């Protein structure tokens, strides 16, 4: 029974990892395709106002800016989570300095 629960937990973890990789792949693919579209259509026969290629290029630029914003927000969240995880370690460090005499194994009855 323990093995089954452990196996299910590990397969769920693998599923989350696979989903994260799929999302990462989508971000990278969209970024690359948008960049390629902008670069390849930078010089086109523009018809002026209402040009569909210019409209698509603006959409691609907007999408790249949104992805960049999302990446910055994710990095800030990751830094905040890392900082939060560091706090208990520092608290434990200070608590070890304020240990009791018993914890430091100092005998008072000599
Ligand atoms: Zn155009």
Image (cartoon, rainbow, N blue to C red):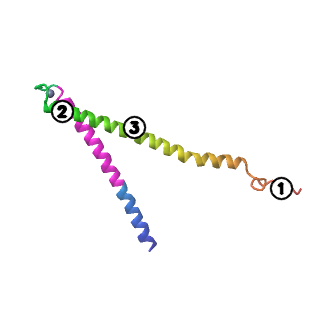
Question: Left of 74 or right of it: where is 104?
Answer: right
Q: Is 87 or 48 nearer to us in this picture?
A: 48
Q: Quadrant of ligand 1?
A: top left
Q: Secondary structure at mark 2?
A: helix
Question: Mark 2 or mark 3, which has the lower sequence index?
Answer: 2
**Is residue 30 on the magenta stretch?**
yes
Question: Mark 3 or mark 1, which has the lower sequence index?
Answer: 3
Q: Is mark 2 within 8 Å of ligand 1?
A: yes
In the rendered image, the quadrant that contains the C terminus is: bottom right
Question: Mark 2 or mark 1, which has the lower sequence index?
Answer: 2
Question: Left of 47 or right of it: where is 25?
Answer: right
Residue 17, given in percent of the width and then of the height, sits at 37, 54
Front label number (2 vs 1): 2
Residue bounds of the magenta highlight:
17-42
Q: Secondary structure at mark 1?
A: loop
Residue ID for mark 2: 55
Q: What's the CA distance linking mark 3 and mark 1?
A: 55 Å
Q: Which mark is residue 107?
A: 1
Front label number (3 vs 1): 3
Residue ID for mark 3: 72
Q: Are marks 2 and 1 in contact (CB under 8 Å)?
A: no
Question: Left of 50 or right of it: where is 33?
Answer: right
Q: Quadrant of residue 55?
A: top left
Q: As drawn, which residue projects farthest toward the bottom? A: 1
Residue 72, given in percent of the width and then of the height, sits at 39, 37
Q: Residues within 10 Å of mark 2 (few under 14, many from 20)?
A: few
Looking at the image, residue 46 lies above or below residue 90: above
């Amino acid at each position: 029974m323990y093995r089954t629960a452990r196996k299910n937990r590990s397969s769920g973890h693998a599923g989350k990892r696979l989903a994260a990789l799929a999302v990462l792949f989508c971000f990278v693919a969209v970024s690359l395709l948008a960049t390629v579209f902008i670069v390849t259509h930078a010089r086109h026969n523009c018809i002026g106002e209402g040009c569909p290629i210019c409209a698509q290029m603006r959409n691609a630029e907007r999408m790249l800016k949104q992805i960049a914003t999302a990446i910055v927000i994710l990095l800030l969240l990751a830094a905040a989570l890392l900082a939060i995880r560091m706090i208990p370690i520092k608290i434990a460090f200070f608590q070890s300095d304020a240990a009791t005499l018993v914890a430091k194994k100092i005998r008072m009855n000599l």
